[in-house]
Image (spheres, grey):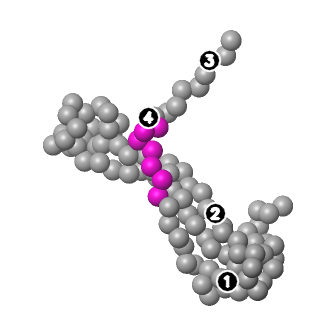
Amino acid sequence: MSKRPQLPGDPSDLYLRISYDDELWDTPQADTLERWSVSVLHRRRAHDGGQEPAATGNCVTVECPACTVEDATVGSMTFYRVHLDRGRNAFRSMEQESEELY
């Protein structure tokens, strides 16, 4: 029987940061596409004194005065919202923006 792989960290310490990028505003695709970026952040506490970062659950108290909280990016994704009711052909707009359609 195979063992189930363990997660590298506590999933409750993962957060998503969702942001809208307006980098397409000066391109022909601006009316058809919206670019949204999602970052996966791992929240961890770093103890003063040069110790290794620890998970947020490893502190003795919740308000540990020797800890600072930092968010490390552990992954990211980019999503495109495609407006099918606008003037440009949606497939052509995506084809020009991304080389990963095929």
Outermost residue to the top: 1
Element type where label 1 sits in the image: helix
Question: Label 3 near label 4: C-beta < 8 Å?
Answer: no
User: Residue 40, image x and y in percent?
Assistant: 50, 51
Give the quarter of the image for residue 102: bottom right
User: Residue 4, image x and y in percent?
Assistant: 61, 22
Q: Is residue 16 magenta?
A: yes
Give the quarter of the image for residue 98: bottom right
Crowd band around label 4 with a 10 angstrom C-alpha radius: few (<14), some (14–19), many (20+): few
Instruction: Of the two numbered discs 4 and 3 on the same chain, state the one appearing first in sequence.
Output: 3
Instruction: Please state if 82 lies on the left or on the right of 54 as rendered.
Output: right
Q: Which residues are magenta?
A: 10-17
The residue that mark 3 highlights is 3
Give the quarter of the image for residue 6: top right
The residue that mark 1 highlights is 31
The residue that mark 2 highlights is 79
Instruction: Of the two numbered discs 2 and 1 on the same chain, state the one appearing first in sequence.
Output: 1
What is the spatial separation of the Cα atoms under label 4 and label 3, in whole angstroms?
19 Å
Q: Would you say residue 49 is visible in this rendering?
A: no
